[in-house]
Structure formats: C-alpha cells, structure tokens
C-alpha cells in the first residue's frame, strides 16, 4: 500500500531534505519548508527516517547543502527524490 | 523581553538567589556537603580539583572557583578550604570580594571537621538571612548570559531540537543578549564554517587554532577524531559526512557573528555570541559556562540527558516524541511537533524563548524540581601529580 512520507528542509539554500518518516520506493513525500512552502516529490528509493532526499536533480561534482552549509559534493548524478547518502555524497575533506 | 531577576552589587542580574558553598579543593567536599544539607538556600559545588596540578590547570581551577563565586545567581559565598591546597584561597577570596559583599571562609586544618561544620552552618544561616533581602525586579533580557549545550543526542537532535535552539539563539542575540557555546570536539569538520562567522580575521584564526590544537592533542594519543567520523552508527542514522554531523551539533549556535573565543570558564567581555574552549562532557562544560557568568543553560537532547546544575537552571529541549513522553520528568520544552506535526522551527524557538523568560523569573526546571543537580567538575587538561 502506498503511503505519504514527510521531510523537512532546514534552510532555504538546501538542495536536500531530511526524512521525518520512513518511505518506500514510489511513495510520495510531503516536503515542509521553513517559509510555509510545500512540495510533493516521489521517492526513488526506500529512504529511512533521518536520512536525506534530493529536492532537485543534482549534477556530479555539485555541492550538497544542508543547514544552508556545504556538507559535501555529489560523486555521481543524483535525481530528484533519490536517497542522498554515502553512495553518492562525499566529504570535501 | 523582560524577566524578573535579582540585582547584584556589581550590576549583574541573577535568576536564582543562592548561597554558594565552594570547596576550594576536593578534600574539603565533606564539610561543604554537610553544611549545605543543614542549611536550606545553600548550594554546594562539589568537585575533585584544586591541588597537585600543572601550572596551567591550577590557573584554570582558580578561574573557575572565582567564576562560581561571582556568578550572578550567587548572592553570597562560603569558601571551604582544607588549608594546604595549591590553589590560593586568599586570592580567590579577594577576587570574589570585588563582586560580592558577603564572602566568608573556613579552613578545615585550623578547626577539624566538627567545628568547621558547626561554624559553617552558623555563617551559612546568616548569609541566607541577608540573601532574603534581595527581591526580584524587572530587567531586560540583555542582562542574561545563556549557555548552549547538547547531550545524549540522536537523529532528532540535528533535525529538531538543535535547529530550534539555534533559532532561539539568533533571536536572543538580536534582542541584545549574550550566548556562549563550545564543545570543541563537536566542531571538528565544520570549523571552516564557524570561522567564516567570526567578526574579524583574528577571531576566525582563533577558532581554527582551538580546533586544531585539540585535534593534534587527541592525535598525539593515537586517536583520529576526524578519520573515525561519522561513525557506523551515525551512517546508519543518515549522517553521510563529518561536516554534516558537526553542523547538526553547531546549528544550535544559530547564525550570528562570533565575537570571540573564550578560555574555559572565562566571562564574555560584552553582549553577543561567543565560543568557549571546552570539552563536550556535561559536568565539565556546564561548569565552564556557569563559571563564565551564564545564569542559565539551554540543553538540547534526543535520547534524554537528566543533568541540571547546582547554581543555574538547565532547560532541557527535546525533539524526540518517544523521549518526551517516556522522560517527561526531565524534559522542559517539547519540540517534537517539528517531527510529528510539521510545526516550523520558528514556532518551536518561540516556545523556547517563553520558557527562558519563565525560568529566569523563577519557574523551576524539571531538574530543579527533582533535585537532579549535584554532579559537577572542573576541566583540567594536564596530569594530576
């Protein structure tokens, strides 16, 4: 059964949101921004609570923003709705 | 915003009105504790330092003992000395006396246990009587120094409680208040981001220096704090990089400019946001903040940290719905609706600000209500000799 997940965007500059619930592949994710804006995206993977989801398509080498700051760079193309984690995101150190 | 506090001789404003019973060395704890148990209104600061330190640690311990005595929540001070400790009781007495009219001392080696306790109880009772003359009056929030800390963190800390505290911190700074954060171990990996928030190039370099100094010291012991982070547990919880992990912790310092880097236990020179050189562990970090003049602490937690502090209220803020319900007797501000109902960080920060004003004006925190507030210590960096 399809369900709707929730995710939060912690800063307006961010290109990822953090999951507030678990979602399965194909589920809709209701994304809550800080300034009343809302967005619905479709999950491209199973994404657990606390993990990140891409808000838009991100190119290889592009910086990933969370809290309005750079948390690393994309090491491959990431699609909107895709799970963003160690398989596609690397520290800049 | 205004709160009801106690004005002190030096113009500072306390949110509590305690007599501090301060052992100048760990060997004086039993006397300090016995006096405090017999006189209501007294708070003992039982620690384990004060003797057999390297010189830099001795200086730190003295700074903390003086800082405790002149904290605005303290109306009067009773120092309990063993007599032969390395810290200078005379210097501590003299320094606190510059800020407080009522400072007394008892030396155990001149009296023995029983007489020290009896004299101490008499003195403490007199000090409590004189403290009763202070009455709460209205003061602006800019009179507050607020320390921020997170502990027993989990995934919800970085999503809910820390960002909500960060928003509250921004508002406090905008209103002219003062906030101090620290926990240098948690800054590793995001120091370049903090350095960009410094008011000057000099402060920016100081931020990078304290982080590097700590990292090198830990490295000399064979531990690589940068390399081992994020941990497997962090990765399972969704944290991908060390920057992300550190940002989740330092987001509680908000986004204001950082005015300076303070020594452990040092008081900020003016209003604004400051970073204190300090460890992450509660019992030592809270001491640094409170010896540095903080009248209260905002403490963000995920799994639930119960600690308070003898002479300052510690407000627990939690975003984990399960912890908020299981540990209701420890959590002061429940911000779990960020996760369960999607309330904004802004709204959550307003709840924190309201709580600050109420607690500053006398409302007891959960830790104060249950008396979970006795364990403290002083951070030393060298060997005990």
Image: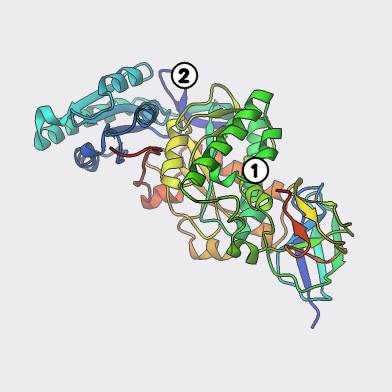
- Residue B65 sits in which quadrant? top left
User: For numbered disc 1, what is the local secondary structure?
Assistant: helix
Q: Earlier in the sequence, mark 2 or mark 1?
A: 2
Give me the C-alpha separation between circle 2 and circle 1. 28 Å
Task: Pinpoint residue B273: horizontal percent, then vertical percent.
Answer: 61, 31
For residue B355, say whether it is visible: yes
For residue B200, say whether it is visible: no
**Badge 2, how many Cα within 10 Å: few under 14, some, many 20+?**
few
User: For numbered disc 2, what is the local secondary structure?
Assistant: loop
The reply to whether discs 2 and 1 touch (Cβ–Cβ < 8 Å) is no
Residue at 42% of width from left, 32% of height from top?
A: B291
The quarter of the rendered structure image containing the C terminus of chain B is top left
Chain to which mark 2 belongs: B
The quarter of the rendered structure image containing the N terminus of chain B is top right
Is residue B76 depicted above or below B252 in this figure? above
Disc 1 target residue? B166
Residue at 61% of width from left, 52% of height from top?
A: B161
Is residue A16 depicted above or below B20 in this figure? below
Disc 2 target residue? B11
């Amino acid at each position: 059964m399809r369900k709707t997940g929730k995710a939060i965007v912690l800063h307006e500059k961010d290109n990822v949101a953090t999951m507030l619930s678990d979602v399965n592949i194909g589920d809709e994710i209701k994304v809550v921004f800080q300034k009343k804006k809302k967005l619905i995206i479709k999950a491209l993977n199973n994404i657990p609570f606390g993990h990140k989801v891409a808000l838009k398509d991100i190119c290889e080498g592009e910086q990933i923003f969370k809290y309005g700051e750079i948390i690393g760079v994309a090491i491959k193309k990431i699609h909107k709705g895709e799970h963003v984690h160690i398989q596609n995101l690397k520290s800049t150190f | 915003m205004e709160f009801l506090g106690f004005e002190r001789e030096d113009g500072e404003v306390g949110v509590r009105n305690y007599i501090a019973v301060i052992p100048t060395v760990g060997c004086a704890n039993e006397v300090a504790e016995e006096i405090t148990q017999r006189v209501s209104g007294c708070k003992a600061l039982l620690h384990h330092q004060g003797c057999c330190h390297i010189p830099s640690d001795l200086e730190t311990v003295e700074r903390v003992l003086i800082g405790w005595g002149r904290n605005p929540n303290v109306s009067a001070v009773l120092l309990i000395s063993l007599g032969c400790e390395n810290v200078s009781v005379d210097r501590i007495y003299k320094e606190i006396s510059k800020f407080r009219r009522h400072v007394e001392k008892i030396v155990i080696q001149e009296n023995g246990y029983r007489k020290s306790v009896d004299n101490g109880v008499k003195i403490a009772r007199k000090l409590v009587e004189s403290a009763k003359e202070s009455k709460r009056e209205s003061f602006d929030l800019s009179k507050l120094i607020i320390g921020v800390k997170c502990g027993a963190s989990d995934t919800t800390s970085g999503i809910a409680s820390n960002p909500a505290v960060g928003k509250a911190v921004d508002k406090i700074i905008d209103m002219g208040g003062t906030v101090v954060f620290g926990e240098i171990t948690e800054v590793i990996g995001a120091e370049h981001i903090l350095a960009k928030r410094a008011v000057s190039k000099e402060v920016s370099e100081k931020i990078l220096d304290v982080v590097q100094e700590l990292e090198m010291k830990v490295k000399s012991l064979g531990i690589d704090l940068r390399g081992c982070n994020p941990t497997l547990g962090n990765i399972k919880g969704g944290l991908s990089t060390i920057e992300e992990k550190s940002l989740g912790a330092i987001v509680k310092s908000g986004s204001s400019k950082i005015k300076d880097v303070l020594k452990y236990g040092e008081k900020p020179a003016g209003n604004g946001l400051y970073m204190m050189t300090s460890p992450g562990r509660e019992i030592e970090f809270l001491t640094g903040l409170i010896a540095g003049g903080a009248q209260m602490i905002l403490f963000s937690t995920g799994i639930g940290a119960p600690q308070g502090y003898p002479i300052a209220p510690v407000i627990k803020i939690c975003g984990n719905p399960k912890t908020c319900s299981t540990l209701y007797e420890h959590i002061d501000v429940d911000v779990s609706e960020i996760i369960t109902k999607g309330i904004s960080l802004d709204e959550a920060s307003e709840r924190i600000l309201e709580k600050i004003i109420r607690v500053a004006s006398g409302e007891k925190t959960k830790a104060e209500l249950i008396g979970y507030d006795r364990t403290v210590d002083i951070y030393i960096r060298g060997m005990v000799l």
